Image: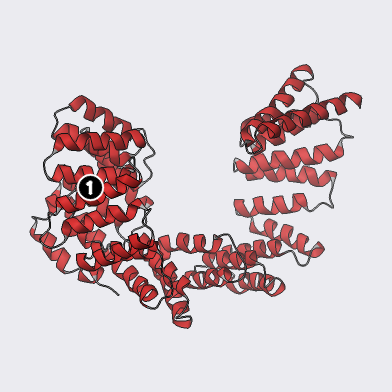
Amino acid sequence: MKFRKLFVLALMMAIFTCFATSAQNSDKITQAVMKVYNDHLIKNPNDYSTLFMRANQLFYNNDYDAAMADVERVIQLAPSKETELLFDAYLLRGKLYEMKKDYQAAMADFDKAAEIDPKSLSWVDMKGYCAYKSGDYEVAKKQFETILQQQPRNYEAMFNLGCIAAKQGKEEEAMKWVNNAISLYPAEVKVYLNRGYVQELLGKYRDASDTYLISMGVTDDNGESINRLFTLARDHYDDVMGSLRTVIDENPRNGLFYRLSSALALNYKHYGQALRDLKVMTNNNLMEYSTIYNDEAMCLFQLGDYDQAYNYINKAIASDATNPDGYVLKSMIELRQGKGGNYKTALATLDQALALNQDYVPALLTKARMMIAQKKYKEALPLVTKAVNAEPENADALMLRGWLNKNHLKNNAAAKADFEKVLTLDDSELTSLTGFALHELGRDTEATAWGEKMIKIYVPIGGEAYYYAAALQAAMGNKAQGIKYLESCLANGYGGLYDIKLNDAPYVNLAPLRTESSFNVLLNNSQFNFQER
């Protein structure tokens, strides 16, 4: 007993020392706690209690293999009289099997825990979840019904029963469970989120959208309802927008719903759709702040109305003169005003952005691209290098410097190094530009495969992945395939007229496709994409 107290005291002292050094440094606390466990187990390798504590810490550290090794030793070493510890050990091992998606092994451990304490609901809930995940819905249903027998107001059990019924195609039963939970807890946001999830399982996406909009008004949900809406919109954009239109019609003076609708439209590059809601907000004084004005300016810029865009970006800057983004967008608008080519004015505006932050990468790259457009390649290089130094893993900066060195400064070795650096970055985002780097390195088959992967990852709504794929094929000289991708891009609502028709900044652009006769046909047939609506 005395030894155990000394061990606990050592553990507490390690934690206290870390708090005294830095109360916010959780990594140091974890390291200190692990050191106490490790040092103790070196001297006492069969101390199953300490092994179990370390196993739990390893579990929370996400080191599942090491946690599994420790908990298996606990089960081997602990005598049968240590029922409480063995019960917890079987639960922990079951959770570890669950993390590995070995649901049968997990349920076997939960059954062992049940032999030790058949009255506990812990193993019942865990077994029910694993049975559900493995597709054994009848076993899962039995577990959650057992919980409700002892806790008739347990809304999580009701939710799980609703999920099971939904998976079995029993819509009426599924909705009964989640609606019962709402009737019991009308002020609890989680029950509304649960209902929305079950409605998604049932394929009732418009109903799910309606539910998430309701849950926003129940209590503060830390943005979960909005996250659900935006996630749902990836595959069911029209359903979500339909719900928003209905709630806007019912609440025409609530700026929040217009803001949600415009943000969602912007997310999928539906600039004309976004502009309608943004204008309602500012014209009716529902919401006015710099970001809204900035978004209006961006929409108008993409739709080709540079003079109106200029007015709104000036309002954005007047509202917040400390945000360099406003000056970057203003420079792009100024460049295109009138007959275009207003480099002196645009560059002066970019200098205002850089006066706020000399290392601001979007301003540096925009200025570099304007230099490139004027064939001032040597002046562009230090700007791009400064951007790379500010953000060494910025794919846009690396690609632009590589492109500049390869195509205009004849420094192929430096270009190759930048393109290869891009390939070391995470390639799961469009902005990773992996396909473009592969193309520059002569690996076009892999580049095409990346473009196809992006189309699968990014749902077609908005068409942005198709835009990138079209630009990539255009860069390769595969104009026919580029036009096919452009057709899909426009068919999925891509609304950036500037990007489609005018943008020729290296390297993501459609310039090589614009001489094709089918290009103008596609553009003329897609005018709805570029209209305020």
* The image quarter in which residue 242 lies: bottom left
* The image quarter in which residue 475 lies: top left
Give left or right: position of 460 versus 444: right
Q: Residues within 10 Å of mark 1 (few under 14, many from 20)?
A: many
Residue at 52% from the left image edge and 65% from the top image edge: 200
Looking at this rendering, what residue extends furthest in the top direction? Answer: 43
What amino acid does circle 1 point to?
Val
Looking at this rendering, what residue extends furthest in the right direction? Answer: 1
Can residue 497 be seen from the camera position used here?
A: yes
Residue 265 placed where, x, y %? 36, 65
Q: Secondary structure at mark 1?
A: loop
Q: Which residue is mark 1?
A: 508
Residue 296 placed where, x, y %? 32, 66
- Vertically, is 365 above or below 523? above
**Closer to us: 147 or 40:** 40
**How many numbered discs?**
1
Give left or right: position of 292 versus 372: right
Q: Where's the N terminus, which quadrant?
A: top right
- Vertically, is 456 above or below 172? above
**Closer to us: 181 or 14:** 14
**Closer to us: 247 or 204:** 247
Residue at 20% from the left image edge and 58% from the top image edge: 334
Residue 422 placed where, x, y %? 32, 35
- Vertically, is 53 above or below 456? above
**Closer to us: 374 or 93:** 374
Q: Where's the C terminus, which quadrant?
A: bottom left
- Vertically, is 282 above or below 442? below
Can residue 304 be seen from the camera position used here?
A: no
Residue at 35% from the left image edge and 44% from the top image edge: 357
Residue 37 placed where, x, y %? 73, 26
